[in-house]
Image: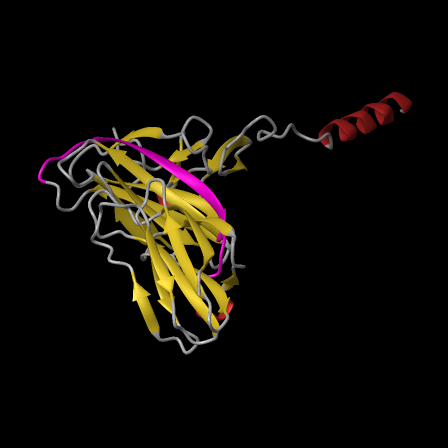
Amino acid sequence: MAKALAFAVLCACSAEAPQPDPCADVDCGPGQCVPSSEQAACSCPQGYIPADMSCKRNVREGDDHGDSIEAATPVEPMEPIQSVAANLDNPDDVDLFSFHVTAGRIYRFSCYGAESGYTPSCWVTLLGADGLELPGSVGTGSFSSFQSGVLATQGGTVYARVERYPSSSTFFPSYKYSLLDRGPDDFANTLTEATPVPVGTTVSGSIEPARDVDVFALDAVAGRAYRLSCGGATSKCGMKVRGPGGELLYQSEMYEISKRGDTFDLRGMQEGRHTVELFVASAILFSNGIGDYTFSVANLEP
């Protein structure tokens, strides 16, 4: 009887012993392992499909990057000189990339293609989660590259779509891409938030994304004259000068490409706060509307 009881207890304990977890050694990548009939199976998120006990992006055969937001390739910000090779496998192909942005920082996604006259061979558009063009983003091209930049107003995921340059008569499949985190905007871009610049000083800044402006303020004294100067090493720097009432006193001629900067002598003005809006031309040959600059305010003889 005692032996029979011991055998029954042993059998009961064996029956209650936990079974091994079939998902213990399975890595489904972006998906989740789900036990099914004591076997492991990968449940994949939208845009991914099960493959070899993992999840891979659902892209067309022979395509290197997905054609939809759901199958976008995740990318991280790169070093300034870094880029990655990619291909558009046919003239109608598009490549989608996804990246995370932080509010208040500037991001630039660029593509570099074969030289095709005076236009690039590829085109970049930044998209929001809804698949529509991202508000505030600006695209601009130069000799063999195209880029789209944005000053993020909120955090989240942004998408970059690369496609053939619309007006290019020749299809160039190969290109390279890069993603840069350019940091926060360096100076305010409204008249009310203008950054004061003391006379006799020089400040350095950067215009980005394209169509950005940096606004500075000069508290002018009656009877004195000032020289306002801006210059750029690789960009065409221009300025708009306004009086205390917001009236336009001067604007650079941006189609004059013989020089990289401009100078304006402020004479006979009203006493009070004058503002200077700095920008980079994008309407001249080989300019993409971004670049570094210096700005200075100097005293002139009364």
The residue most toward the left is: 169
Question: Between residues 138 and 219, which one lies in front from this camera angle?
Answer: 219
Residue drawn 40% across the image and 58% down it? 228
**Range of residues picked out in magenta:** 169-189
The residue most toward the bottom is: 245
Question: Between residues 47 and 207, which one lies in front from this camera angle?
Answer: 207
Residue 112 visible at all: yes
Q: In which quarter of the image is residue 99?
A: top left
Q: Answer above or below: position of 220 versus 204.
A: below
Q: Quadrant of residue 50?
A: top left
The residue most toward the top is: 3
How far from the left and from the top, in percent, is residue 25? 58, 26
Question: Between residues 221 and 117, which one lies in front from this camera angle?
Answer: 221
How far from the left and from the top, in percent, is residue 237? 33, 51
Residue 68 visible at all: no
Residue drawn 40% across the image and 73% down it? 269
Residue 182 located left or right of residue 249: right
Residue drawn 50% across the image and 33% down it? 28
Quadrant assignment for the N terminus = top right
How far from the left and from the top, in percent, is residue 37? 52, 34
Residue 192 shown in magenta: no
Quadrant assignment for the C terminus = bottom left
The residue most toward the right is: 2
Residue 178 shown in magenta: yes
Question: Between residues 236 and 105, which one lies in front from this camera angle?
Answer: 236
Residue drawn 43% across the image and 67% down it? 275
How far from the left and from the top, in percent, is residue 274? 44, 69
